[in-house]
Amino acid sequence: MTQHSTPNFDNLRRVLLRQGPPGPVPFIELFADPGLIQSVVGENLSWEMLFAEGIAASAASESRAGLETLLRFCQTIGYDYVWGWTGLHFRRANFQIATDTAAAENWRGGLRFWQDETTGPIQSWADFEAYPWPRPEHISYHGIEHLNAIVPEGMKISVVVSGIFENSSWLMGLQAFSYALHDQPDLVAAICARVGDLTAAALRHAATVDNVGMFFLGDDLGYATETLVSPRVLRQYIFPQYTRLLQIAHDANKLLLLHSCGNLTHIMDDLVALGFDAKHSFEDKIMPVEDVYRRWGDRIAILGGIDMDLLTRGSEDEVRRRTRAVLEVCAAKGTGYCLGTGNSAANYIPLRNFHAMLDEGRRWNRDRMPR
Amino acid sequence: MDLAQLKQRLVDGDAPAVTELTRQALDAGRAAVSILNEALIPGMTAVGELFQNGEYFVPELLLSARAMYAALDLLRPHLTASGVAPAGRVVMGTVQGDLHDIGKKLVVIMLEGNGYQVTDLGTDVSPERFVAAVKESGAQLVGLSALLSTTLPAMGQTVRAIREFDPSGSVKVIIGGAPVTQAFAHSIGADGFGRDATAAVTLARQLLPAP
């Protein structure tokens, strides 16, 4: 495998903080699906290998092997970081599983998990009290501690953090959560606060790990035309929890990036004001990333944005042309933008398109940035 | 009895009030079809406009839908007895391989709230099941939903299956979902693309003959 570049988290940090002088455009992803990873590095990898919560000793070695495969993938692609997770997990069984029907080059067999939007393990105060909430002292950090020990010079760890709105609404099911905003608002407030407490505890500990460079909070708040719930609800229940997480990250001199899908036009100013260092996840159908960059790029770093539908169903030539067009706008200043997909390096993106996007980024850096 | 208050309580998402006011209206001798046409449908139309304008969101729409269904439960026996025809018959479903439900559910709510009879097939629906449901229900409109780019091909397959069953094109097909665009709808021969739940009602009114 060819390692395309030497990791340089200092450059990534400079870009995310929108500082000069102009430099190479880094690559960024929230994460990559195991199927894509194993196709690039030629090693077996599964989601189970990557999570370290409550693992037995025998599974621990498999988990370490999985993380080392992940690290090799990140080095091969040229990311300045490797992503990892804490062991914070909210137990629930309200998801549906179906065969992954994506006719993808890099995923043979396997299943796709879908969120049950109707209900969840917490529907009442009795359920809230009976729910097996994680205890902060029992949250495992084996994964990021192992990465901390093996990450090479110049590379840092991005800790992927599961979202406040997502976990709170998933614990009830979005439909039940919606009714509860009217019928049981105190219960909604309690769930959001508890999820916030535990997420804050995990962040606080992870921030003490030397090679953690940033946190990447994944919290989908919207869909094609709007946020799922009103901005008023988000400001009341969710944004105060974001404020806590941002305080923890920034006090430890770590960055906090937000991945959030959907049309967030009516809350982007809120997200900027809260202090997120960057925003990820954009779709051409909602607002092309270069339009987002023009509108907010002077106040928050803009990440990725090469449309998932284009990457999935477009030709390699279309992907290359689109990537160059995005770079012409978003990378012109040499800071404040990182190149990547509009959502994640999913298993259903044809490898040739994924590599084409990255290749255009390398050409841009070669042609535009002085050695 | 003034039905304006019933309409407003529906818009407010107040299910207990809507239930009580519907009962009062029926007890006062108002015809079920009159309650439907003068309060419920206008109420859901107003809800749809608020949703489309970004003033109502998923929770508000669900609360109004809960109130609407509470009223419909009271009206249904009366509507059936009086032989009131629906505004149209629709089959809805999320296409094969896709399990996303709530987007499709919101469309069902808006269509039923506007007097359409909807057969909701749920998720992961094969082209064959869509065709079977059209045959059984006599539906004139089929609505397809998908969340992922990878399940879009199933939309094309479903459109082809419906065209094979109905070469005349009298059964219309509309599509929607996160990766769906007007261009994609045109490419697979769908009759319309709806960007949200309210748009689906507009399309249904445009594509189907008035009852």
Image (tube, coloured by chain):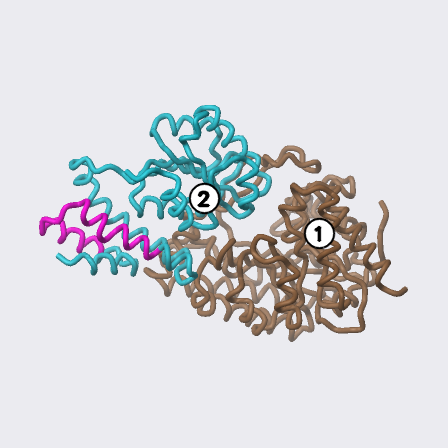
Chain colours: A brown, B cyan
Contact between labelled residues 1 and 2, with CB atoms less than 8 Å apart? no
Task: Indicate the position of residue A29 as horizontal and vertical percent values.
Answer: 69, 55
Give the dominant element type of the magenta stretch: helix, strand or loop.
helix
- Name the quadrant of the C terminus of chain A: bottom right
Q: Relative to residue B14, is residue A66 depicted above or below?
A: above
Question: For residue B50, which quarter of the picture?
Answer: bottom left
Task: Indicate the position of residue B146 as horizontal and vertical percent values.
Answer: 51, 42
Amino acid at pointer 2: Asp
Residue located at (32% from left, 53% from top) = B45
Q: Which residue is mark 2?
A: B101
Q: Which residue is mark 1?
A: A322
Residue located at (48% from left, 29% from top) = B127
Q: Residue furthest left?
A: B28
Per the image, label 1 sits on a secondary structure element best described as: helix
Is residue A206 visible to the viewer in this orientation of the structure? no
Which stretch is magenta? B18-47
The CA span between labels 2 and 1 is 32 Å
Which mark is in front, 2 or 1?
1
Of residues A342 and A2, the one nearer the viewer is: A342
Per the image, label 2 sits on a secondary structure element best described as: loop
Residue located at (20% from left, 60% from top) = B5
Is residue A96 visible to the viewer in this orientation of the structure? yes
Amino acid at pointer 1: Arg
- Name the quadrant of the N terminus of chain A: top right
Q: To which chain does the residue with label 1 belong?
A: A
